[in-house]
Image (cartoon, rainbow, N blue to C red):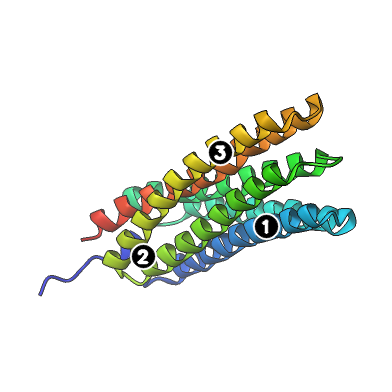
C-alpha cells in the first residue's frame, strides 16, 4: 500500500508542531471573527444597538488576534527549517486564510454605519447572506482538520461543498441588491447596504479561495 505523504511534510518535528498549533489557532480565530459578525447581524436585525456595537468590537478584536497569529507564523516560516515548497504552501495558506478575517471585519464596519429603519426584505437578505458565510467557514474548518489528519478525500468533499455555497452566495448577492434597489432607501443607507452585499459575497469568495488551496494541497499529498 502506498504511504501518503503527511500534509506539508512537517508534523513530526517540534518546530513544525509549534507552527501547526499556531495554524489551528489562526483557523479558530478566523472562525470566531465570523461568529461574532453573525451575532452583530442578529442584534442589528433585532434593533439592539448596544449589543450590535459590542459584537462589532468583538469582530475587530478577533481580527486583530488573527493578524497577530499571521505575523507570528510568517516569522516562524521565514526563519524555520521547512523545505521551500512546504514553506511556500504554508505562507500562501496563512495569507489566504487571513483575508477571510479582514473581509469579515470590513463587513462589520459597514454594518456599524447603517442606521435608521431598514425594510424587512433587505434585513432578510442580510441574514441569509450571513448564514451562508457561517456555513462556509464551518465547512472550511472541518476541511482543514481533515487535511491535517491526512483525510484527503474528506477534505476534497468539504471543499466541493464550499464551492457550492459560494455559488449560492453569488445568487444571494443578486437577490440582496434587487431588494435594496426596490426598497427606496435613503442615499447613505443605499450605499452602505449595497457595499455590505458586496462584502458578504466577498467573504464567501475568500473562503472559497482557501478551499481551492486545500484541494491543491490534498492533490499534492496523494
The residue carrying pointer 1 sits among few (fewer than 14), some (14 to 19) or many (20 or more) residues within 10 Å by Cα, namely many
Question: Which of the two discs, 3 and 1, sits closer to the camera?
Answer: 3
Q: Is residue 4 visible?
A: yes
Q: Which residue is mark 2?
A: 147
Few, some or many residues within 10 Å of mark 2 (<14, 14–19, 20+)? many
Q: In the rendered structure, which disc, 2 or 3, sits on the residue that comes first in sequence? A: 2
Image check: 98 left or right of 45?
left
Q: Residue 182 appears at what percent x and percent y?
A: 67, 30
The secondary element bearing badge 1 is classed as helix
Q: Residue at x 74, y 33 (%)?
A: 192
Residue matched to label 3: 175
Q: Nearer the viewer, residue 19 or 201?
A: 201
Q: Which mark is residue 38?
A: 1
110 vs 82, left or right, is: right
Residue 20's place in the image compared with 216, above or below, is below
Find the residue positioned furthest to the top: 187
Furthest residue to the bottom?
A: 1
Residue 106 relative to residue 93: left or right:
right
Q: Where is 49 relative to 180, above or below?
A: below
Q: Earlier in the sequence, mark 2 or mark 1?
A: 1
Amino acid at each position: 500500500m502506498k504511504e501518503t505523504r503527511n500534509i506539508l511534510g512537517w508534523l513530526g518535528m517540534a518546530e513544525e508542531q509549534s507552527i501547526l498549533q499556531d495554524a489551528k489557532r489562526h483557523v479558530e480565530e478566523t472562525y470566531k471573527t465570523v461568529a461574532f459578525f453573525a451575532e452583530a447581524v442578529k442584534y442589528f436585525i433585532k434593533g439592539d444597538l448596544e449589543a450590535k456595537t459590542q459584537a462589532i468590537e468583538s469582530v475587530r478584536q478577533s481580527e486583530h488576534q488573527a493578524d497577530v497569529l499571521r505575523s507570528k507564523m510568517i516569522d516562524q516560516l521565514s526563519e524555520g527549517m521547512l523545505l521551500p515548497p512546504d514553506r511556500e504552501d504554508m505562507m500562501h495558506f496563512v495569507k489566504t486564510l487571513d483575508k477571510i478575517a479582514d473581509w469579515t471585519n470590513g463587513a462589520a464596519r459597514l454594518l456599524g454605519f447603517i442606521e435608521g429603519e431598514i425594510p424587512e426584505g433587505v434585513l432578510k437578505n442580510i441574514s441569509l447572506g450571513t448564514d451562508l458565510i457561517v456555513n462556509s467557514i464551518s465547512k472550511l474548518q472541518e476541511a482543514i482538520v481533515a487535511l491535517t489528519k491526512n483525510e484527503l478525500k474528506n477534505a476534497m468533499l468539504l471543499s466541493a461543498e464550499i464551492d457550492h455555497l459560494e455559488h449560492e452566495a453569488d445568487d444571494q448577492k443578486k437577490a440582496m441588491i434587487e431588494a435594496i434597489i426596490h426598497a427606496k432607501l435613503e442615499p447613505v443607507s443605499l450605499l452602505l447596504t449595497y457595499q455590505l452585499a458586496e462584502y458578504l459575497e466577498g467573504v464567501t469568495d475568500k473562503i472559497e479561495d482557501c478551499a481551492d488551496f486545500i484541494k491543491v494541497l490534498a492533490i499534492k499529498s496523494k
